[in-house]
Image (spheres, rainbow, N blue to C red):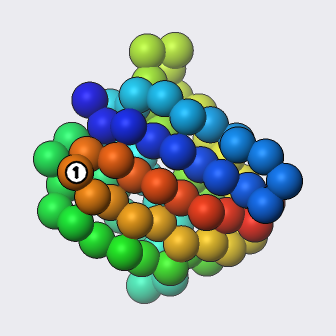
Amino acid sequence: MLKLRIIAPDRMVFEGDVESVTLPGTVGSFTVLNNHAPIISSLENGKISYRDANGQTEVAVRSGFAEVRNNVLSICVEI
């Protein structure tokens, strides 16, 4: 499993284990799975979509950035 943290300036939007996350990167959307290579990417206006034990969830974002390292995906966003 992949650990996901979605953080907005005023709150923790989500923190938990997920199977996959699709992000609106500034050069195109991309999906992160378990054991993904380390990456840092900027994000543009769009939706972050993640799948966990409860099913598929989407979070609308205006901008932000994401970092993947050691099966932890940290996303800082403006909502």
Q: Is residue 1 left or right of residue 35?
A: right
Residue drawn at x 70%, y 42% as measured from the top left: 13
Q: Residues within 10 Å of mark 1 (few under 14, many from 20)?
A: few
Residue drawn at x 67%, y 64% as measured from the top left: 77
Residue drawn at x 34%, y 47% as measured from the top left: 72
Q: Does the image show residue 64?
A: yes
Q: Does the image show residue 46?
A: no
Q: Quadrant of residue 2?
A: top left
In the rendered image, the quadrant that contains the N terminus is top left
Question: Residue 64: where, in percent of width, then height?
Answer: 62, 72
Question: Residue 31: where, in percent of width, then height?
Answer: 33, 55
Q: Is residue 70 above or below residue 61?
A: above
Residue indicated by mark 1: 70
Question: Residue 34: where, in percent of width, then height?
Answer: 21, 41
Secondary structure found at label 1: loop
| Outermost right residue | 10
Which residue occupies the foreground of this view, 3 or 47?
3
| Outermost top residue | 54
In the rendered image, the quadrant that contains the C terminus is bottom right
Q: Quadrant of residue 58?
A: top right
| Outermost bottom residue | 27
Q: Amino acid at mark 1?
A: Asn
